[in-house]
Image (tube, rainbow, N blue to C red):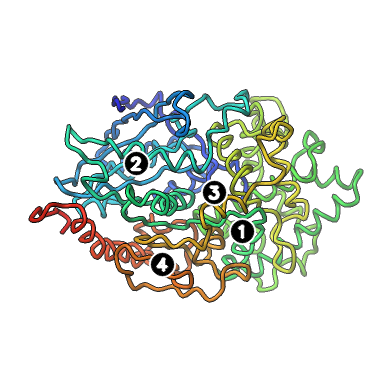
Amino acid sequence: MMASLTHTFSKALLTLLVGQSAALSFFPGIKANNLQLASVLGIDGHTARFNPEKIAETAIASGSGSEVPTHWATIPIDHEDDDVGTYQNRYWLSTDFYKPGGPVFVLDGGEGNAFNLAQTFLGGPDNFFAHYLKEFNGLGLVWEHRYYGESLPFPVNLSTPNEHFQYLTNTQSLADIPYFAEEFKLNGTDMSPESTPWIMLGGSYPGMRAAFTRNDYPDTIFASFAMSAPVEARVNMTIYFEQVYRGMVANGLGGCVQDIQVINNYIDSQLDKKGQAADDIKELFLGKEGTHNTNGDFAAAIGSIYNLFQSYGVDGGEEGLSKLCSYLDESASPDGIAPKIGAQALTEKFAAWPPLLSIINDLGSQLNDGECNCKGQNNSTRTTCELGGRFNAPDTISWTWQYCTEWGFLQGDNEGQHSMLSKYQSLAYQQEICYRQFPGARESGLIPDHPEARETNDETGGWFMRPSNVFWSAGEFDPWRTLTPLSNETFAPEDVYITTNVPRCGVETPENVLFGYVIPMAEHCFDYRLSYKPADKSRQLFSLALKKWLPCWRAEHDPRGVQRKWM
């Protein structure tokens, strides 16, 4: 079933190993997995965006300094039809803290190249995952998701036939780890779930998978830690930007929020006029070569200012929201600076914010042929400014397929008093991205008219799911908390009591009770960050839960008298 080999690390291959990732973010082409990992490694947002090879270098340097070797597993492309064939799926192992009898801890790679994740969390002792391995004498395993990184049933690029994506479903991908685990051995020793407990951890989409796998395959995954896990599929996720609004206000940027709203309203007013006025406002930001872009594509590029929020909060270095706000108004006026200088002058000042053009060109570089040079920022290449088209990074292509078919998560403007985007960032625009990314897929029925979120929730249980032996966490201002069982939104289940009391092993809590924790003043997956001390309680609660739950596994599986190392 399995064969293994190692990859020799070299700087020449580093950029290829880094990969690009869409991840759970408000716009699918911003490499959010890389940004999240960069924040964990202490790398600022600018470096993460424009020097992604630094993430791989730092990941390896944070450990032993040498690459954690790669292993491969043979997995069916279709778990319901062996005739379709198999593919090779990557995974990584660490035995640094393992002692015979210890559990297997699985960290899911989710919707991106998992190389950097493996190097970061398996390569050294000073990270949240390694702390669990050390505490419980565990074997560490990082799993790469099918259709991402190098775990490809079929090549993924702009020429991939739509039919090749039909095996990229929640059902198929959830079956991969149980299939692999069933015959897993370490140096000839049986390490299957029949012989040792398997514990799954993940944040964001991997957190969803940790909960789903425990729910659907309880004989494989004994316990899970679901961090920032939006298990409720939903087409309309404009609530994402409500959390951005709340987070900015809570961090003292309420005046800046008002200024951004004035800017967006002014941009929209010019676009509404059409003709020369619309061309002029686009030219202000993009140059003459950018005036042909649609209002939606132009507004999406401007909205890229929020790309760092879920991973860094209002920080993130020179391109973070706090820096933008300081640039717009050094005095941090509680009502913003717009009342003093007017909407047009404020918009012109925003257009001149030094990082903005690079942010826009970075987004454009992830489309079509990868060439985007608005305003001729790079004088060594031709000036071009195309912001509409198809995402070119393989991981982004795969994630776009997933959210367009099953999850939804379409993040248009949160209309109303808290609006954070142009009105041209509508749900209709977000839906159009699905159609243009996969030409002909809608007509052939491979892409639905709208993501089948309701059907997905019917299959998974959505935020009503309560699998036993699962701990849930999310940040207070995490945009994705809004679709987790920890959500307190008006459309979320009412009167859910969040408890930090560890439930009994193997016992599901009622729908109105949830074992979980909301991390104060945190955003997305801050559990991963040992430097963020308010997340200590979340990490400790899962440790306490394992100490209570693991003896149950021993009682059910071990012969009498066998002592487990985590006891």
Secondary structure under badge 3? loop
Q: Nearer the viewer, mark 3 or mark 4?
A: 4
Q: CA distance from mark 2 to mark 3?
A: 19 Å
Q: Which x, y percent locates residue 145?
A: 44, 38
Residue at the spot of label 4: 516
Q: Nearer the viewer, mark 4 or mark 1?
A: 4
Question: For the residue carrying disc 4, how many other residues have a C-alpha within 10 Å: few (<14), some (14-19), or many (20+)?
Answer: many
Q: Which x, y percent locates residue 5?
A: 29, 24
Q: CA distance from mark 2 to mark 4?
A: 24 Å
| Left or right of residue 324, residue 169 in this image | left
- For marks 3 and 1 on the same chain, the one whose residue lies earlier in the sequence: 3
Residue at the spot of label 1: 240
Badge 2 amino acid: Val
The residue nearer to you, when weighing 96 against 257, is 96
Q: Taking the image as drawn, is residue 375 in sight?
A: no
Residue at the spot of label 3: 24
Q: CA distance from mark 3 to mark 1?
A: 11 Å
Q: CA distance from mark 2 to mark 1?
A: 29 Å
Q: Taking the image as drawn, is residue 23 in sight?
A: yes
Badge 3 amino acid: Leu
Question: For the residue carrying disc 2, how many other residues have a C-alpha within 10 Å: few (<14), some (14-19), or many (20+)?
Answer: many
Identify the residue shown where x is 49% and y is 24%. 84
The residue nearer to you, when weighing 318 against 154, is 154
- For marks 2 and 4 on the same chain, the one whose residue lies earlier in the sequence: 2
- For marks 2 and 3 on the same chain, the one whose residue lies earlier in the sequence: 3
Mark 2 and 4 residues: CB-CB less than 8 Å, in contact? no
Q: CA distance from mark 4 to mark 1?
A: 21 Å
Residue at the spot of label 2: 142
- For marks 4 and 1 on the same chain, the one whose residue lies earlier in the sequence: 1
- For marks 2 and 1 on the same chain, the one whose residue lies earlier in the sequence: 2
